[in-house]
Image (spheres, rainbow, N blue to C red):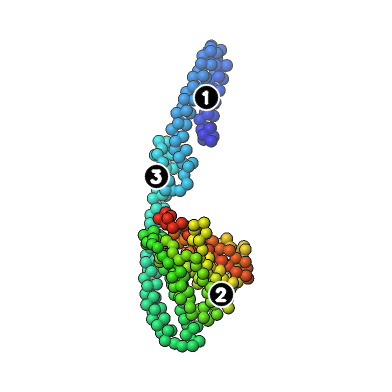
Amino acid sequence: MYFKENISVIILFLIMNSFIVLVGLVDSGIPNVSIIYLVLFNLLILVIYLAWDFNRKRTFSKEFDGLKTLNDMEGINKPHVNAQKQVYEKLDELRTYHQTLLEEEAGKTKENLDELTRFIHDMKMPVTTMKLMIDDLEGTDHDKLASEWTRLNNMLNEVLYLQRLPNIKNDLYIERLNINDLVKRSILKLRSICIRKNIGFDVNFQTDYIYSDKKWLQFVIDQILANCVKYSSDNDIVIVGIMEDEHFKLSVTDFGRGIKEKDIDNIFQAGFTSTSDHDDDQSTGMGLYLSKEVCDILNIKLTAQSEYQEYTTMTLSFNKANNFSNITMK
């Protein structure tokens, strides 16, 4: 590559020395030895120049080839060659401009998120009022409205927790929790929907206590149970908590529509709903994504097993009790 860049210098050297040899052949008065010495001297000068020039350009070229992002420009030594200086200055100018755009977009994003958070909190008040009004109703109307209220409240919570997720490490408090109580609390929130869809719960725990963050773990359990209830009807949801190899495992199994094999690897991706059930307007594609993100931060392994049209099992595998302090912060 370097020799290709300097081909003009090499060609000029060849032309110049060819001219010297030609003069020596035409003028017999010039000794051949002098011609040879002159050509060799020119060759030495060329080699010295190319070595010096290569050394000047090598450091910058090597660092330039290692660039992956414009921000990496900060770690590059400023070049001494004019052409490289121009490239460096232009890239640095682009980096500064790009950084300015990113900061502007980050500011706009923060403003939008703050506005969204305010909107959700403002929505919480009328939603709470709606719940009180619905509780005063009786019969079928109460069950239907309570079911829709639960869906609305869950969607608002999804958006609220999505906004909080980037700062989750500032909002963690690890403590000893009664996992059975958290599950019961989640079931209670879904009571209206479960009554309307004739869904029951079969709950069995070998142990009740684990270490985790109460608020975020409650959110994960809420999302998993809400997802199970959403796609079930006229069946029990089986919830089992067991100790296995000194690890606590919580599994939730529903016998609803299940997940197709080709979809199982994508269900934890943001916005993914289904490759076939596109007419399903119940799914936002965010619940399981948020649950997986939270579990990764809480050092909980979230996995899924399913047979389409048969069952789906979501499993939370917790760390050993004495390892709860080793939570990875993102």
- For the residue pair 59 and 82, the one nearer the viewer reads as 59
Q: Position of residue 283 (x, y in %)?
A: 53, 71
Residue occupying the point 53% across, 73% down: 202
Element type at mark 2: strand
Please tell me in which quadrant of the rendered image residue 4 appears: top right
Mark 3 in CB contact with mark 1 (< 8 angstroms): no
Element type at mark 3: helix
Residue occupying the point 63% across, 68% down: 308
Q: Which residue is mark 2?
A: 236
Residue 201 sits above or below residue 11 on the image: below
Q: Is residue 289 visible?
A: no
Residue 142 sits above or below residue 28 on the image: below
Q: Please report whichever mark, 2 or 3, sits nearer to the chain's N-terminal start.
A: 3
> In the image, which disc is placed on residue 16?
1
Q: Quarter of the image containing the C terminus?
A: bottom left
Residue 191 sits above or below residue 271 on the image: below
Q: Please report whichever mark, 1 or 2, sits nearer to the chain's N-terminal start.
A: 1
Residue 202 sits above or below residue 216 on the image: below
Between the residue at mark 3 and the residue at mark 1, the CA separation in whole angstroms equals 43 Å
Between the residue at mark 1 and the residue at mark 2, the CA separation in whole angstroms equals 93 Å
- For the residue pair 11 and 196, the one nearer the viewer reads as 196
Q: Give the amino acid type for the residue marked by disc 2 in the picture.
A: Asp
Q: Which residue is mark 3?
A: 74
Q: Position of residue 145 (x, y in %)?
A: 47, 82
Residue density around tag 3, few if under 14, some if 14–19, many if 20 or more, within 10 Å:
few
Q: Give the amino acid type for the residue marked by disc 1 in the picture.
A: Met
Please tell me in which quadrant of the rendered image residue 161 appears: bottom left
Q: Please report whichever mark, 3 or 1, sits nearer to the chain's N-terminal start.
A: 1
